[in-house]
Image: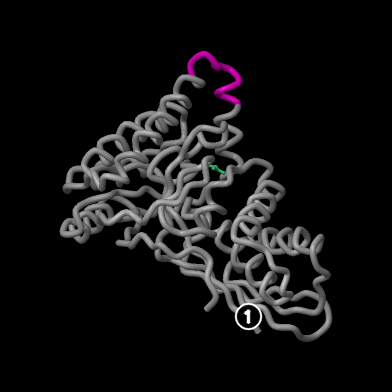
Amino acid sequence: MVRFSAPGKVFLFGEHAVVYGKKAVACAIDLRTTVEITRSGKGIHIQSAFKDDPDKNQYIKTAIKKFQVRHDVSDINIKVTSQIPVASGLGSSAAVTVATIAALNEEYQAGMTRDEIAFMGYQTELEVQGAASPTDTFVSTMGGTVIVPDKRKLPPITCGVVVGHTGISKSTSRMVSRVRTLKGKYPEVIDGIMDCIGNMSARGEALVLKNDYKSIGELMNVNQGLLDAIGVNIPELSLQIHAARSHGAYGAKITGAGGGGCMVAICDPSRCKDIANAIGRSFGDSFITKPTAEGVRRE
Ligand code: MEV
């Protein structure tokens, strides 16, 4: 039996723009999905914590299909448990994909490197979703703070991190395709916004290296304005974002595709509780989380 877990993530900067090759900055967070593989029975059986989300099994099945190019897979049970809310923008699909590939790699002694696991994870997301950047699978594999598409890993951020969850489910591929349509219609406007988000990520990377969380927060607020401009904000996320800002967050924005899902606020660690309470009072749920340096790992 082998058991591997992989973390979820938040975007500090760059969702949507990263789909067009612009820079993004994402941090792994301390919520994990665990995949256990045992050899037994006949055929491949999946027992998933994501019972209400059949899409997730598609990630597991596609990951197995990709892995089968390297090694035959048969007669296994796969058991998935997860702390990451689904369809929330916190990277639950990437985490289950990466943990599945890493567990298969170990079970069959396939000798894949972390880079290869991240790449196969990306290929899996791409096939299931039709559109994906390598961000979620890369950060879930490597942990820490990552810069994509450069694929650099920095240490985790050390400020407080609070997540607001609207509980409104969204489809990443639908949001990506909506932005693509807008970009196709007004390229002279939207291309500039994507460039600007990419520039913010570049500046964000330098600020992460300096632990300048006040400035990171300031730029996250600007990034939020541009996410609103490309049509991925909803009023419920705005309520949470403004609640966080007015209770002392350095910055707050959507994390992930938007249209529902989650927002993220960064703050001085002493402010986390107040901010989480304020978000919860404004709409939906909230929780305090911690950045983590650990990507996919054996349990
Ligand atoms: C989804 O978590 C973030 C998007 O940028 C899509 C992607 O990067 O694959 C919207």
Q: Is residue 138 above or below residue 39?
A: above
Name the main secondary structure of what is drawn in magenta.
helix
Counting from the top left corner in percent of width and height, residue 30 is at 40, 65
Residues drawn in magenta? 181-189
163 relative to 21 in the view: left or right: left
Q: Is residue 261 visible?
A: no
Secondary structure category for the residue under label 1: strand
65 left or right, relative to 287: right
Q: Position of residue 48 (x, y in %)?
A: 62, 72
As for residue 187 lying within the magenta part, the answer is yes
Look at 32% across and 58% down and name the residue there. 286
Asked if residue 170 is positioned above or below residue 200 in the image, the reply reads: below
- Quarter of the rendering occupied by the N terminus: bottom right
- In this image, 108 relative to 116: left or right? right
Q: Within the magenta stretch, is there residue 257?
A: no
Identify the residue position indicated by label 1 in the image. Answer: 2
Q: Position of residue 248 (x, y in %)?
A: 17, 47
Q: Answer yes or no: is residue 107 visible.
A: yes
Above or below, 275 against 25 in this view is: below
**Amino acid type, mark 1:** Val
- In the rendered view, tell whether residue 126 sits above or below residue 78: above
Residue located 35% across and 34% down the image: 203
Quick one: 121 or 174, which is closer to the camera? 121
The quarter of the displayed image where residue 55 is located: bottom right
Nearer the observer, 140 or 223: 140
Residue at 75% in and 62% down: 67
Residue 98 lies, in percent from the top left, at 60, 62
Instruction: Give the residue drawn at x 20%, y 61%.
Output: 273
